[in-house]
Each structure stands twice: as C-alpha cells, then as structure tokens.
Image: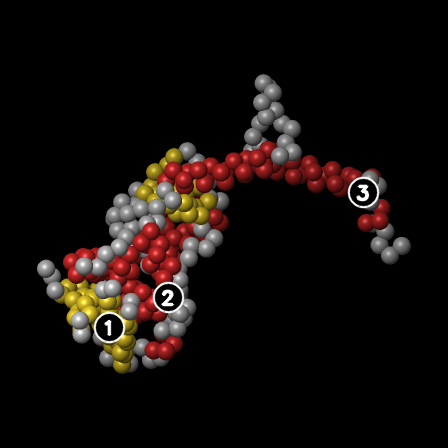
Amino acid sequence: MRVPILKQGDYLIASVQSVLSDDDLRLLRDDLADRVGRFRSRGVIIDVTVLDVIDSFATRTLRSVAHMLKLRGAHTVIVGIQPDVAFAMVQLGLTLAGVGTALDLEEGLEYLNGRSHRLHEHRAFGSREEDRLGHPVRPTRHTQEHHALRAHEEDEKKLFSGHASPRSLDYGH
Amino acid sequence: MAIESRVRISDTAGIVTARQQGRTLALELGFEGSDLTVIATAISEVARNILDHAKSGEVIISRYQHGGKRGICVIACDTGPGIADIEQAMQYGYSTRNGLGIGLPGAKLLMDEFHIKSTVGLGTTITMRKWMH
C-alpha cells in the first residue's frame, strides 16, 4: 500500500497506514525524494507507529531515505517506533545512526522546528538588513550569497590596500 | 487453533504474510509482548533470504513441544543454489549482495535455536525455534 505523504508548510509528513512490504518501502523512498524536490521541503517526518516489524531491510531503507533527503536539503525524523520494535531492532544490532528520531508526530515536529530555528538564527546572525518598517529581514539564499561575495571582496580589498597583516604576505623576508 | 501455517515466498508480499502468520500463531501459542515482535522479525529475515537467494521457497511455522518445553518452530526452505560457505554466510555483517549482512545472523540472535542445512545446487533449509519462558 502506498504511503500517503502530506505537505505541511515546509515539511512533508509520510504517515505509514499499514504494514509495508519491501516494495512499498522502496516506493516510499522514491516518492519522498521526488516530493522534497517538488515542494522544496526542509523537513520530513516518517511516522512508523503502525509498523510491527522493522527488520534489517526496513532499517536500511529508512536510513538511506534520511541520508538521501539530507543530500537534497531536508532533515528526516522517524517517529513512532514501538517499544517492542525498538527491542527487536537492538537485539538485531540495528541502529538508525545519523537519523533523527522522536517519540511521536508532535515531538517530531518540535524536532524539525528546533532545527529550522537554529538554522534561521544562524542565518540571521550578522545580518543588519531590515525592511521598510524596521523589521529584520530573513536573508534569502540570494542575500546570503551577496553577503558572502561582499565579504570576500572586502577581504581582497584589505589585502591589496595593505590592511591585512603584512606578515602574511612577507614570505621569507 | 492453527497448528501449522505454510506460506509460499515468491515476492515481497509473501514476506509480510509469513511474519503476520508467525505473529498470529505465536500469539495463539501464548507468546506475548516483545517475543511476538522478535519472532515476526526473525521470520522476516529468513523469508527475505529465500527471496534474495533462491527467488522462491516456503516458510512453515508450527507449534513445537519437546521434553516439557513449548515453543514455536519456523522452517524456511528453498530449492535454490544453496550456500557454499555457511560459516561465512552466518558472519554478522557479511553480505553477498548489497545488504547489511544482518539477515541470517540476526535471525539467529533473535531466536533460541537456529540450524542451517545447505547443499550447493539443492537448496537451503533453516530451522529455528523460540521457547516459551
């Protein structure tokens, strides 16, 4: 059965509704890779609450989904792994290393929100831009590139106008 | 009460059916909690092994009684190419395909007993059991 994928703002929520065969899991992986690009999603939640078995194949697929989506610019969080399933996974030596996990959907959203807040703070740091009403403007990719370019140009100017530490230029003297 | 359940494995849906039948039978036999998940997961691994290496085969799940002990017995058999080096195949992390190499050794970790018999060209039979504690 195909897993429905809902779009919720910047996030996608894949809510597993029934047990999944290996083929269903592969389909989910491909669907998510496609949607993340189409909707420019920043985060993906995969809700596996109904799964009664997460074996080596399922673990490997979930892990590769998360790593693949990360390369596409989205964070993945797996939510709802049942205690018995977690127990069996640990006995099998299976881990979801490098993949976000959370107890349930609510915590999964919090996890992603936490990540994106940190991202926005990081981006806003050092930005002096404000809109006409004086509110700070969230830098877009364009302004980020602009800042980076300007910073680079200023460094070069300093270098050639002698503001940079002369020692760094006086090799061997 | 079903005493035995046979599931033909020839596609990935068969893996799902096998582990569901295993869980149902284990529940009927009196297993509970994480044991049900552990048994279903082990069945999933051996069933996938059939599909990956022999294309098709059968999983037989039955009640097992021996010397006052009760439990569940899972037999996974195929008439595929067989395993030339069982020791290597049972090494945790060893995989002939692009897998994790956790399937068979993982199933062994999950169950109480695990026996594998394989003849190259004739096929493989895995017998595994879990006792009720």
Of discs 2 and 3, which sits in the foreground? 2
Of residue A117 and residue B57, the one placed in the foreground of this image is A117
Of residue B25 and residue B6, the one placed in the foreground of this image is B25
What type is the residue that disc 1 sits on? Thr
Question: What is the quadrant of residue A141 in the picture?
Answer: top right
Label 2 sits on a secondary structure element that is loop
Q: What residue is disc 3 on?
A: A164
Q: What residue is disc 1 on?
A: B127
- Is B121 situated above or below A108? below
How far apart marks 3 and 1 lie (CA) works out to 74 Å
Disc 1: which chain?
A: B
- Is B21 situated above or below B120? above
Question: Percent position (x, y) of residue A71?
Answer: 49, 49
Of discs 3 and 1, which sits in the foreground? 1
Label 1 sits on a secondary structure element that is strand
Local crowd at mark 2 within 10 Å, few (<14), some, or many (≥20)?
many
What type is the residue that disc 2 sits on? Ile
> Which residue is outermost to the top?
A133
Is any atom of residue B27 visible in this view? yes
Residue B105's disc number? none
User: At 24% across and 67% down in the image, what residue appears?
Assistant: B131
Residue B102's disc number? 2
Quadrant for the C terminus of chain A, please.
bottom right
User: At 65% across and 34% down in the image, what residue appears?
Assistant: A126
Whether residue A143 sits left or right of residue B118 in the image: it is right
Label 3 sits on a secondary structure element that is loop
